């Protein structure tokens, strides 16, 4: 990962709602689904923000390579791409 890609990831996580969404997905705190995945409706309910706003934040996280979404029946499930953050961490000093 180069600096520009890492900056894109960090920019996506610089918004408080996006950071909260990402951490919730990674920790599996926002959902009754298994760890490392989250139902988008659970995100909306927990954060008390509208569906269009959550959709925007999920798009930003997806474009940064931090999450993927998948439709399961009537549910939209978000999962983290943990390798993206691991690549960013390699660029940071210990």
Image (cartoon, rainbow, N blue to C red):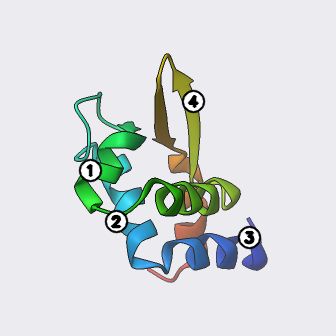
Label 1 neighbour load within 10 Å: few <14, some 14-19, many 20+? few
Q: Separation of disc 3 and disc 4 at Cα?
A: 23 Å
Please report the residue visible at 26 percent of the width from the left and 50 percent of the height from the top.
Answer: 45
Q: Are marks 4 and 1 in contact (CB under 8 Å)?
A: no
Q: Position of residue 64 (x, y in %)?
A: 66, 62
Q: Separation of disc 4 and disc 2 at Cα?
A: 20 Å
Q: Secondary structure at mark 3?
A: helix
In this orientation, which residue lies closer to the viewer: 20 or 43? 43
Please report the residue visible at 50 percent of the width from the left and 72 percent of the height from the top.
Answer: 13
Q: On residue 70, which mark appears?
A: 4
Q: Which residue is mark 3?
A: 5
Q: Separation of disc 4 and disc 1 at Cα?
A: 19 Å
Q: Which residue is mark 1?
A: 45
| Closer to viewer: mark 3 or mark 4 | 4
Q: Position of residue 76 (x, y in %)?
A: 49, 33
Please report the residue visible at 44 percent of the width from the left and 80 percent of the height from the top.
Answer: 94
In this orientation, which residue lies closer to the viewer: 77 or 7? 77
Q: Separation of disc 3 and disc 2 at Cα?
A: 21 Å
The first of marks 3 and 4 along the sequence is: 3
In this orientation, which residue lies closer to the viewer: 64 or 91? 64
Q: Quadrant of residue 11?
A: bottom right
| Closer to viewer: mark 3 or mark 2 | 2
Q: Separation of disc 1 and disc 2 at Cα?
A: 13 Å
Q: Which residue is mark 2?
A: 20
């Amino acid at each position: 990962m180069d600096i520009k890609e890492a900056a894109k990831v960090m920019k996506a996580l610089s918004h408080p709602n996006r950071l909260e969404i990402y951490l919730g997905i990674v920790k599996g705190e926002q959902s009754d689904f298994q760890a490392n995945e989250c139902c988008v409706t659970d995100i909306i309910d927990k954060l008390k923000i509208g569906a269009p706003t959550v959709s925007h934040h999920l798009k930003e996280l997806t474009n940064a390579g931090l999450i993927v979404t998948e439709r399961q029946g009537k549910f939209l499930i978000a999962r983290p791409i943990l390798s993206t953050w691991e690549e960013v961490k390699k660029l940071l000093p210990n």
